[in-house]
Image (tube, rainbow, N blue to C red):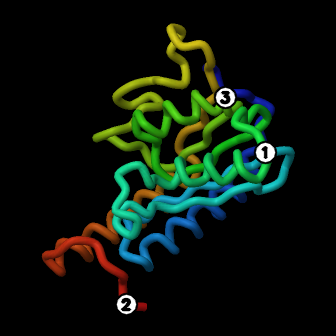
Amino acid sequence: MPENSDIDTAEDERYMRLALEEARGAAALGEVPIGAIVVCDGEVVARGSNRREIDADPTAHAEMIAVREASSALGRWRLEGCTVYVTLEPCPMCAGALHAARVDRCVYGAVDPKAGALGTLYDIASDERLNHRYEVTAGVLADESAAMLREFFAILRARGRAPEPLEG
């Protein structure tokens, strides 16, 4: 989908900073630092961060958690009028969940060259074969998002082990 020129870049950055806070919280718990928030009518209605290790759940991605929380908070599965902010380009599962939830827009930080499904490997948001399309804005605070991921994985490699809570 074409990007909307009326979108407020400062507002996108403000909300992405909230998603980055969620990502920092995930890292502190030993999770891959990815955070997401859902905004509806100018209000943050949900937050999520990766919980795959903690929950032993392969679907516990930040976006999935935030979308579930938003649906619960709003009392509806259709998240029309909502924007999802996430620090890393969604994977196929998460991009599909955003499609299923009928979000209006997804704003993400860093590109995911290994699993990105909003333009990198796939383009689920714009696929005309699907019954819903949503707008995508890529690269908002991408450097900060990518740096957090690089630092997290550098620490893991240095420790030579799987994710666990990071010491302060």
Pinpoint residue 143: horizontal percent, then vertical percent.
47, 57
Quadrant of residue 119 within the rendered picture? top left
Q: Residue at x 70, y 45 (%)?
A: 71
| Residue 33 in the image, given as x and y percentages of width and height | 43, 65
Q: Amino acid at mark 1?
A: Gly
Q: Secondary structure at mark 3?
A: loop
Residue at 76%, 55% in the rendered image: 45
- Name the element at disc 1: loop
Which of 127/138 is in front?
127
- x, y percent for residue 47: 64, 60
What residue sits right under mark 1 in the picture?
75
Instruction: Rate crowding at label 1 as few (under 14), some (14 to 19) or many (20 or more) other CA atoms within 10 Å.
Output: few
Q: SS at mark 2?
A: loop
| Measured Cα–Cα span from mark 2 to mark 1 | 38 Å
Q: Which mark is residue 88?
A: none
Give the residue pinned by disc 3. 102
Q: Would residue 42 be found to the left or right of residue 36 on screen?
A: right
In the rendered view of the protein, which quadrant contains the C terminus? bottom left
Pointer 2 residue: 167
**Where in the figure is residue 79, as x and y percent of width and height?**
72, 36
Q: Looking at the image, is mark 2 or mark 3 nearer the viewer?
A: 3
Front-most of residues 74 and 28: 74
Circle nearer the N terminus (2, 3): 3
Q: Name the kind of residue labelled 3 in the image.
A: Arg
